[in-house]
Image: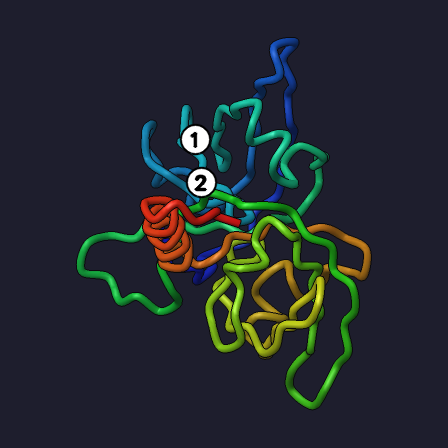
Amino acid sequence: MFTGIVEALGTIVGVERNPDGSGRVVVAADFAAELTPGESVAVDGVCLTVARAGSGRFVADLMPETLTRTTLGTAAAGREVNLERAAAVGDRLGGHLVTGHVDATAAVLDRAGGEGYDLVRIELPEAVEALVAPQGSVALDGVSLTVIDVAEGSFTVGLIPTTLRETTLGRRAVGERVNLEADVVAKYVRRAVQASLASFGVGNG
């Protein structure tokens, strides 16, 4: 479990792809020496398990679904990524509950700078449309953000100076894609409502 508060920036050293659709990613990170095999690290919001670590980098294996569902599938060496180690029991929850299980990728549709902040409009895939609400939480590339407004097919978030400076969202250009994770509470509420409707013979659309 993560909080969506980026701990550090890292760089992808390389992504290997196997014939069966799986793969492996090597990430350079300042805290790599502190990692042990088996622990979790969110890489651009994708929960990965450390396989090996040392010499300023760590290695994580990738399932086929990870490569097809997230931006790691198209990532190349040199890409800067947001990093967050799993939250420890007793830590302050500065953002919101983030699982690192990406729901979809979404394009940056527009961004405009203000005094001390940027407004960024993000594509809202139909599959997660019901899970994103104004003043609700969303994680983009692993960064916990508050939704400002929701329109048909898109939503807007605001990026404060700290976010612009210390995460990759400050440099994501229009047309680039980001990993989107909807609020886990919204997912469970939708599932509960669907199950309740189904028990009464009502469709779960």
Residue 177 on image: x %, y %: 72, 50
For badge 2, the amino acid type reads Cys
Residue located 47% across and 59% down the image: 6
For badge 1, the amino acid type reads Gly
Q: Is residue 85 visible?
A: no
Q: Secondary structure at mark 1?
A: strand
**Total labels drawn:** 2
Q: Is residue 189 left or right of residue 61?
A: left
Which mark identifies residue 54?
1
In the picture shown, does residue 111 fall above or below 116? above
Q: Earlier in the sequence, mark 1 or mark 2?
A: 2
Q: Given the current orientation, which residue lies at the most extreme top position? A: 19
Residue 115 on image: x %, y %: 69, 90
In the picture shown, does residue 167 fall above or below 78? below
Q: Is residue 162 left or right of residue 116?
A: left
Location of mark 2 (residue): 47
The quadrant holding residue 186 is bottom left
Residue 172 on image: x %, y %: 72, 59
